[in-house]
Each structure stands twice: as structure tokens, then as C-alpha cells.
Amino acid sequence: MNVTSSDMTLEQLQADIAAGSVDTVLVAAADIQGRLQGKRITGRFFLDEVLDSGTEGCNYMMATDVEMNTIDGYELTSWERGYGDLMFVPDYSTLRRIPWHPATVMVQCDLAFVDGSPLSVSPRQVLKAQLERLEKLGYSPIGATELEFALYNTGYREAMAGDYRNLEAASTYNIDYSLFGTGQVEGYLRRLRNEMDGAGLYTESAKGECNLGQLEVGFHYTDMLATCDNHVVYKLGAKEIADQEGKSVTFMAKPNDREGSSCHIHMSLCDSAGTPVFPTGHGTQMSETMKHFVAGVVATQHDFTYLYAPNINSYKRFADGSFAPTAVGWGWDNRTCAVRIVGHGPALRFEQRVPGADANPYLASAALIAAGIHGIENELELPEALAGNAYTQDAPSIPRRLHDAVAAFESSDIARHAFGDEVVNHYTHAGEVEMAAFDAAVTDWEVRRGFERL
């Protein structure tokens, strides 16, 4: 049930290129950070050379840090292996117009080796592998991501020139649910809502959040692969539209000492006929399938946190009383828990509240599906719900540092069974690279604290 408001088909693309109304095709794939990377290809060349065979790109794209530095230690790519090519293989079900650029269309791709074999460590393939496992059990997942961000009136180049200090937030106080507050940034929000809709996303609403300049745009649920494809388009578009408006946005999980930005993931299951399988009626009673699935999510929370929170900064968000969870457990419509059960009847679902705005949606969604499969296959019993304030209860804590989360993922038999050694080793190394970079850095905090006093 790929929900889209785009009318773009391959035949329409060919016609629009021939008519001159489309002159650029963005060929894009998500990297290990969940960012869209690729090429801008002229329409004529796309039809002549790329349409049937795809295009090439250096394999280092799947083995860099956030600054695109080439990193030693990956099995996939190295100086010794010559940094060869990967293939961008277009998935034409993802064709969409990009309204914030003139005459531009995007197609999202799977990554493959030059012999055509899929690249198992690419985020989209990691998710597709879990979708295939779930399909064998007779289920398919639907859901949505709730992605928050902070908007600044300071443009990207000015922000960088000022070392990201003294940025002017788009609001000066907490505008959570404030119509007046969002009205002050409606110029940007209106573009974002409407142009995302034109890009094939089903936009629902926009609202303010707690932090200064913090906002959220909501999108309709769909199948999880489409949800993740839409998510990365939205993230790119939010940045590019902000840049065009002389503003900037950040998807850091914790950009300052106020509330962080989350990426809550809502998910439920349907059977092969498209019928929801989580509810047992029109109320809130959970089916045995839902109980097992949610039990799997809870049971793997410690092992899989790294896939929900992949950066050093991710862990700064987890603070008591912050609406970011710290306790492993689930609750009924309880925002203090890592897993929240919400909705009723066909809309009965769970919400995973651990991921921040910096999460790679493909990997986070793959982790949830793998967790649910673990629960279903092992018929795990759902523990008692956490009632009241989970921050103050004697419940296990999620990992509070990237070091701990990476170690848990690397040593997890569940992760290795679900994803395979190649995927676990690849992303473990990515985490180790992130930790080593941070451990080697001298921070502003250290200088301010120790320059004179030590």
C-alpha cells in the first residue's frame, strides 16, 4: 500500500523528458548515515544510457564517516582493493517529482556489485532482507516515522563560518502546538508541506515542538520500505528548501542543552490479504501476534539500540523527564517508555520512541522488524506493562553511551542471526570509527573547563 500523491510513472518520465519539461534526473541511494547520495543526470543521457542499465559510483560511498572521509578497516572497500565501482540500480516504483528544483525528477536505487549481486550492507538492502524474512511468516509491516528538526534563521554557510555558535532559532520560546508560533514560520512550513506532497509524500500536518525552532511535519503511514524512501527524501528536501530560504535545519538528535529531536517509528502488521493482525477487535486488545512482536522489540532493545541511535550525539538525548526514553519496557499510551502502545482497532500499533532524528530509517526499521520476527519465532511472552513514570521505576536502562550500544550489537547472537555477520561487522566498524573520532577530539567543553583552572 504505497501511499503517494505523485503521478510520476516511467512512461510519464520518458514523455516529460522528450517534451523538455524534465531535464534532470537525480539518481539517489541512501548511504550508511541515511543520507541520499548520487548523481544529477541529464534527461537525454538518462534515457539513452541509464534507464535500462543504471549507473556507477565508487564503493567508498558505503564506507565513509559523516564527513565522507575514506576509512580503513571495511571488508567492502579499501586502498588495497582499489576502490572499485558499485551499481546504482533504479527502482522505478520510487519515481517522484522534486518540486523545489525546476524540471527535476528523482529515482531511488538499490546498490549492487557490478555483477548485479545486491550489496547486502547497503541500508535499503538491510531493510529489504528483513521484509523478506517477515513475508515468509505471512506478514508485511506498515508504519510512519515522526521526524523532528530544528529550524534556524541563520543560513548554512553563515552557521559554518561562525562555528555553529549564536545561531538564531526560528522561535524564541516553546511553540509546541502553538498556531501563532508556527504561523511565524509558515512561509517555510507551507513550502515544506506542499512540496513534499508534490514529491509523492502524503503530508498530514505540521506543528511546533519544545525546543527553540523545533518543528515536526507528519506524513501518512504506508508500507515500511516506502516510508523509509519517503523519509530520506523529506530529510534532503527540508535541508534544501531551508537553504533556498536562507535558513538552515539540523537533524542532530541533541543540538543543544534543551530537548532533543526524535524520530519515533510507528509500526503494525498486515497479513497477505492486507488485514491488520495486531488487534483482536475494535478496541485495544492485542492479538498473540502483536504480543510476541512487541515482546521481541522489548527483548532486543539493548542489543539493537545502536541501530536506533548510531552517533555519539544520539546518547545526549536520553535524559530523565525529557520525553526521550531511558527505560526498557512498554506501556499503554505512555510516553515515558521506550515502546508505547497506541491506537485501537485497525489502528492499534506500537511506537518505538528510542530513535533520534539522526537515525538511519532503513536500519532502525530493519531492527524493529528483526526484533519482531525474533519475538514471533520464539513466541516470547510480553512482560508486564510499565505504568506511571517509567523514568523513576526499577526498569533496565537502554545503553547510555555509543560505546556500550556498539559492543552490545557486535556481541549479539540475535543480531548476527537476523542480519548476518557481514552486516553486523560493517556497522560495528562504522560505530568504532565514530567513537575513535570523538575520543581523539578536543572539545570546546574541555578547553573552557580546563584552560585556566587546571
Image (tube, rainbow, N blue to C red):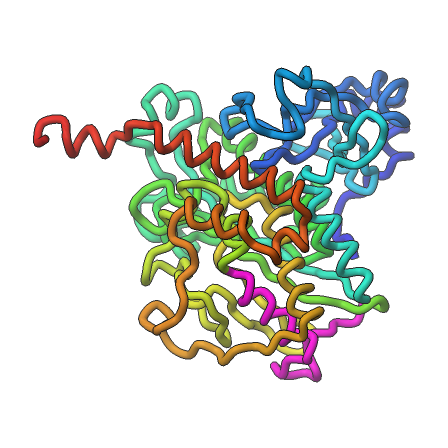
Please report the residue visible at 62 percent of the width from the left and 77 percent of the height from the top. Answer: 344
Image quarter where the C terminus lies is: top left
Using residue 389 as the reference point, say whether residue 447 is left or right of it: left
Q: Is residue 280 above or below residue 108?
A: below
**With respect to residue 79, does 146 lie above or below?**
below
Residue 283 lies in the magenta-colored region:
yes
The answer to whether residue 216 is visible is no
Instruction: Please report the residue visible at 79 percent of the width from the left and 25 percent of the height from the top.
Output: 22
- Magenta extent: 274-301
* x 72%, y 21%: residue: 57
Residue 342 rendering spot, x and y as whole percentages: 56, 72
Quadrant (top left, top right, bottom left, bottom right) of the N terminus: bottom right
Residue 180 percent location from the top left of the image: 40, 52
Residue 300: in magenta span: yes
Q: Left or right: where does residue 380 sit relative to residue 225?
A: left
Q: Where does the image place residue 317, in percent across and percent down from the top left? A: 38, 50
Q: Nearer the viewer, residue 105 or 226?
A: 226
Q: Quadrant of residue 378?
A: bottom right
Look at 59% across and 73% down and name the residue there. Answer: 343
Q: Is residue 73 visible?
A: yes
Left or right of 443: which side holds 104?
A: right
* Extreme residue in the left direction: 453
